[in-house]
Each structure stands twice: as structure tokens, then as C-alpha cells.
Amino acid sequence: MNMNKTVALHTLGCKLNFSETSAIASQFIENGYTVIDFDKKADVYVFNTCTVTENAEKECRQVVRRALRANPNAYVIVTGCYAQLRPEEISEIEGVNAILGSEEKFRVFELLNDFTKTDVSCIFVSPTENLNGFGKAVSSESVNRTRAFFKIQDGCDYKCSFCTIPLARGKSRSMNTDELINEFKQIIHEGYKEIILTGVNVGDYRTESGNNLLSVLEKLIKIDGDFRIRISSIEPNLLSDEIIYLTAESDKMCKHFHVPLQSGSNEILKKMQRRYRVEDYRNLINKIVKIIPNAGIGIDVIVGFPSETDRLFEETFNFLTDLNFSYLHVFTYSERPFTKAISMTGKVNIEVRKHRNHLLRSLSEQKKNSFYKSMLGSKQKVLFESENQNGLIKGFTSNYIRVAVEFDPNLINRFKDIKLCEIKDGLVIGKLLETNNYFAIK
């Protein structure tokens, strides 16, 4: 055991990475380490990396240097997607001691039983074609055990021309259903009220026994307890009518879908090697809104993809303007090594990419405001989760409206009914029905 030894962990990228970082932290705790904040001086630093954008890789190099300024003698481990794809590049970062690939991150103490500082980096990375394991992972954003991010799927069989994730995580694979249900029950037992199902391609959950995402959801909602389920993100071609209807009918399913679009131009979608056309996506969103009128709908969009002319971007902008959704996640296209898109012609100027990003972010704010207005007068159930933040406590509605009320510790990790009353200074003012207190939704 390593009594009095400390470890600090830092995550770059998606919610799936955050859940896997928690799994890594558990390994250290089981071996006698104390987990401390990243900004503090630690004996070991672990960086779980992303490779979706160039900025994530730059940030990795920056945080490694920052950690070594805090403790030049610290043992530094870099893992995650960046480590899986370009371990030799990471080994050249001064001060890095070990690089662990996508599977090796779950075997830290098996591979590294001596955290002695050396001048040479050790690399433990399996070939992508050999990635077939499934590392269990659950994480939380709150110390109050309110919302848990539960990994049920890993890897991806899709071949989007801009994406490195299939190369970094391997083929699609899913958690055994019986194990999933047992783990889910344990999460409920630990007091979590909202469980977000995460993965690289959650909608592709499937097992050899014939279970898929729909059948798993049908099993989970039958479990006793005061909780709700949120799907982190789901590809449009995998969001079936059955899942939409199940979400509409069950109180335990959050009325919220995050559905990646990437482009509102069929020409660009084809070059991205996406599995749908604009018309298919529009029909899907319209169907969601028809079946679940108050559904929160989030959309991913990439701007500046190769050959995205002003005309093609305008197609995306107009398509989104006419679409019924509640917010956007806008990404500026970033050239990624090993992808098909990097060799495509028609590179878009960086400043043009930034301008398009700004336009869509402004549209997102307009859509979000319209969505809030449409909810005025309705009663919504909010799960309060945060601690005292400048006199406020925050939480989410089922359809993903962020809520803030006057701080009351008795609200933490509890569902409360509220009525949305008015919008004032960019906020939605509502009434907590039990106490008639007023609060704001950001």
C-alpha cells in the first residue's frame, strides 16, 4: 500500500472520459492513494486525454507542464484517446513517465507497480484492432451524488471522415446486460437520482444475447426507486420510434434527446460519411416534437468542414433556423491525423470557420430563449444538485432546462415541482410550488 501518497487526475474531452477518469481514480484509492485537486502538489498526476480537436492535444501538453511546475518530481501518466493514437508524440513531452492506451488505462497498477521518476517514457498501447475489453466506469459532477454518468458502451463501427474516435477506441462493444442492470441498481442504491447513459455510440448498444438500447431501457425503467434516466447522445439513425414513444410514456425517461447533425447540407453530409440525409433528420426532429411537444433537443454541428462554401454553410444555417430545437453544440472543424477528411480539398480559412461558429452560437442562444418562452406557465420537475453558489442552488428539468433557486440545503438531490412564470433580464422566473419562493432559470 502507498499510505500518504497522493494522486491528482485531470480529464480532457467528453463525459465518457470523465466517467473513465473516475474508474482510474478508484484504482489509486484501492491502492492507498488519496485523490487531491489537480491544482495541488501531488505525487502522481494522471491525464485522461481527448483527440477530437487540436486544442485538446495542446491543452494536454500545457497541463502536463503546469503539473510539473507544481512538483517537478511527480510521476506523470498520460492516457486516453490521444495516448492511444500518438504515444510517441506524447513521449517527447518532457516529464511524461508513462503512456497508457485505451485499454491499459484500466490496468494502471498491473502495468506500473513502481511510480519512480525516470528520464524515459514507458509506452503501453495495444493496437486498435486488439481493443475489445470493456472497462466499467461511473462518474459524478456533484459531491452530493445527484447525477451519475454511467458508461454502457464503448468504441464505434462508424467511419465518419472527420473522426478519430474509432481509431482510438476500436470497434463498438457493450456492457453485459445483467452486469449493467446490477451496476445500475448499485448506482441507485448509492443515492443518485439521475443516471446519464454514456458511451462513444450509445445508440449502438447491443449484446450477443440480442439486447439493444430499447430492451435495456425497458428493463431499467422497471427498477424500483426515485430516479430518472437520460441518454447522453444518440445518432439520428439509431433513435427509433420505439425509444421516442418509451420516453414519452415513462416518467423515468428524461424528455431530452441530444442528436448529432454535423451539417445541414446533404453535400457535406455525404463527404462526412454520415448515415442520413437532411430530410431524414428533419423528419426525426419533427417526429420527436409531435410525440413529446416539450422535449429538449440538443444538436451537434461542425462548421468549416473541407469544401463547405458560403452557400453550403447557408444551407446549414437556414436548415437550423427552420428547425424546432432548444440548443446547439457548435464545433469548429479541426484537421485530425489519420482521418479521410484531412486530405480533402477545399480547406476553409480559419477566420471563416470562427465566423461561422459565432453565427451558429448566436442562433443557439435565440433558440434557447424561444424554448424557454415556450415553457412559460408549465409545471416542471427539477432535480436540484449543486451546493451553495452565491446564494443559489441549481438543477435540471427533465427536458434539460438549467434551474437556479434561492439556496436551501434541503433541496439537494431532491425532485421538486416548479411553475415557470416569466422571463426577466435573460432569466426565466418561476415559483417553487411548495413554498411560493421565486427562483431563476439560466
Image (cartoon, helix red, strand yellow):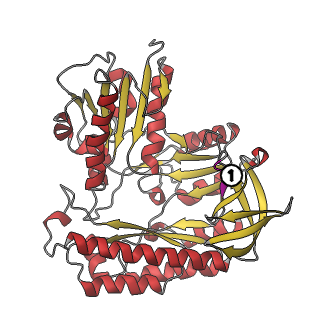
Q: Nearer the viewer, residue 321 or 438?
A: 438
**Number of marks drawn:** 1
Estimate the x, y position of residue 302 in percent, counting from the top left.
33, 70
Which contiguous range is marked in magenta? 389-395
Residue 293 seen anywhere in this rendered image of the structure: no
- The residue positioned 64% from the left and 57% from the top of the image is 218
Answer above or below: position of 297 versus 38: below
Amino acid type at circle 1 is: Ile
Look at the image and tell me in which quarter the C terminus lies: bottom right
Seen as rendered, the residue at the extreme right is: 435
Q: Is residue 361 magenta?
A: no
Left or right: 364 as drawn, with respect to 130: right
Q: Picture coordinates of residue 420 (x, y %)?
A: 74, 71
Q: Is residue 64 left or right of residue 153?
A: left
Q: Is residue 255 above or below residue 215?
A: below
SS of the residue under disc 1? strand
Q: Position of residue 296 (x, y in %)?
A: 59, 70
> Can you give x and y, in whole percent of width and height, for residue 345 in the image?
13, 73
Q: Which residue is mark 1?
A: 393
Question: 331 or 288: nearer the eye?
Answer: 331
Please give the name of the residue rendered at 75% of the width and 47% of the height, measured from the top-left corner: 225
Q: Quadrant of residue 236?
A: bottom left
Of residue 144 and residue 124, the one placed in the foreground of this image is: 144
- Lateral position of residue 39 relative to residue 118, left or right: right
Residue in the picture at 17% in, 40% down: 89
Residue at horizontal 66 percent and vertical 65 percent from the top: 441
Q: Residues within 10 Å of mark 1 (few under 14, many from 20)?
A: many
